[in-house]
Image (spheres, rainbow, N blue to C red):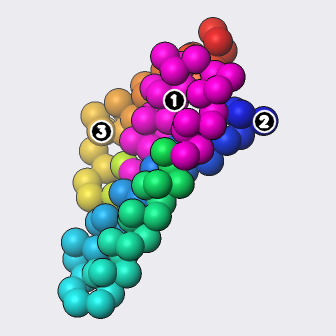
């Protein structure tokens, strides 16, 4: 169950970075709503990460949490914010995914 919680925490990390990106391109009340969602998802992500580390070692949980957030953020950056999808960028994202899977396997 704590692995599912850890995955949700990583997805919340992706969510709060998305909200930060949207808040940066909006103005006025729309920007404030995106920033409020950023704060809420940030808190939720930290709470879930804390709960997951009760049974998953921090040395495993933290890199997986940041890996999920990093991969999700890059994918959202490419799909939503039209950031470049160069060969090397995608190559290193795939190596990050492989590393996260590797940490889960050796745990």
Q: Which mark is residue 64?
A: 1
Q: Pointer 2 and pointer 3: residues touching (CB < 8 Å)?
A: no
Residue 15 at x, y percent in the picture: 47, 59
Observer-nearest residue: 78 or 22?
A: 22
Secondary structure under badge 3?
helix
Residue 56 at x, y percent in the picture: 64, 22
Which numbered mark, 2 or 1, is in the foreground of this view? 2
User: Mark 2 or mark 3: which comes first in sequence?
Assistant: 2
Observer-nearest residue: 36 or 8?
A: 36
Q: Pointer 3 and pointer 1: residues touching (CB < 8 Å)?
A: no
- Return the residue at label 3: 89
Instruction: Check if residue 55 falls in the magenta segment.
Output: yes
Q: Main secondary structure of the magenta part?
A: helix
On the question of residue 97 being in view, the answer is no
**From what the image shows, is residue 51 above or below residue 8?**
above
Q: Which mark is residue 1?
A: 2
- Left/right of residue 18 with respect to residue 1 in the rendered view: left
Quarter containing the N terminus: top right
């Amino acid at each position: 169950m704590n692995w599912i919680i850890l995955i949700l925490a990583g997805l919340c990390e992706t969510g709060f970075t998305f909200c930060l990106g949207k808040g940066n391109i909006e103005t006025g009340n729309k920007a404030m709503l995106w920033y409020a969602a950023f704060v809420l998802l940030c808190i939720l992500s930290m709470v879930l990460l804390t709960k997951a580390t009760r049974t998953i070692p921090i040395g495993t949980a933290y890199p997986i949490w940041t890996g999920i957030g990093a991969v999700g953020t890059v994918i959202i950056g490419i799909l939503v914010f039209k950031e470049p999808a160069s060969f090397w960028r995608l190559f290193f994202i795939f190596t990050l995914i492989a590393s996260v899977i590797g940490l889960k396997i050796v745990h």
